[in-house]
Structure formats: structure tokens, C-alpha cells
Image (cartoon, rainbow, N blue to C red):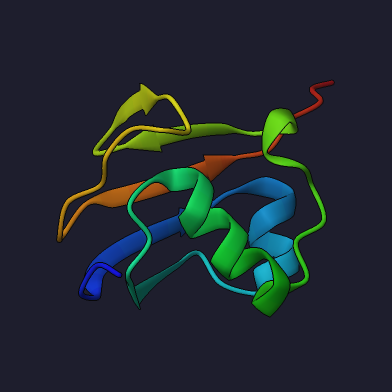
Amino acid sequence: MNPPMQYRLLYFASLRDRTGCDAETVASAAADPRALYAEIAPRHGLNLAPERLRVAVNGEFAGWDRALRDGDEVVFLPPVSGG
């Protein structure tokens, strides 16, 4: 198992509503965004499947299997409807 790293998570739209916060810093041994989302989703009651979300790491869209590093900023972006 990897040692815990610090990640800064940002939440927007429905994910912000669900988590009740704009951002948080978490310590996690997750090695990629998919594992990180799987870890935080139950804690916050997030029920969107990863396939319905986009992920960005350090301001750039990334794949769910991108390797994370200590201090990375991770954003999970839900589908947004406009009007």
C-alpha cells in the first residue's frame, strides 16, 4: 500500500451541493483519480459513476488512471446543464 499523500479536492455544481464544501484537503493512499473518487464518494454520499464525471489534475483534464503525486489538485466535474 502506498503511503498517504495530501490532495486538494475541488467540488463544483452538484458535487459542491452534495459535499457541502467548495474544497477540502485529504490524506489518501489513492494512486489515481479513480481510487481517490472511490474513497471519497461513500463519505460524501456521491452517487455519480466515474463514467459520468470528468476529472482534472492540476488544472488539466486527465484520465481516471493518471498517476497522482503528493500535493496534486484534483477536480471531479459533474455533467452540467445550462440554460
Residue plotted at (75% across, 61% down): 46
> Above or below — where is 60 with respect to 20?
above
Residue plotted at (74% across, 31% down): 52
Which is nearer the eye, 78 or 31? 31
Tell me the quadrant of the picture where the N terminus can be found. bottom left
> Above or below — where is 23 with respect to 66?
below
Q: Residue 9 occupies which quadrant of the picture?
A: bottom left
Q: Residue 40 occupies which quadrant of the picture?
A: bottom right
Residue plotted at (81% across, 26% down): 81
Q: Position of residue 62 (x, y in %)?
A: 38, 25
> Above or below — where is 82 with respect to 50?
above
Residue projecting furthest to the left:
70
Residue plotted at (66% across, 71% down): 19
Residue projecting furthest to the front:
1
Which is nearer the eye, 2 or 44? 2
Q: Position of residue 24 (x, y in %)?
A: 41, 72
> Above or below — where is 76 with respect to 42?
above
Which is nearer the eye, 74 or 16? 74
Tell me the quadrant of the picture where the C terminus can be found. top right
In this figure, what is the number of numbered marks?
A: 0
In the figure, is residue 2 to the left or right of 11? left
Q: Position of residue 57 (x, y in %)?
A: 31, 38
Q: Position of residue 55 (x, y in %)?
A: 48, 34
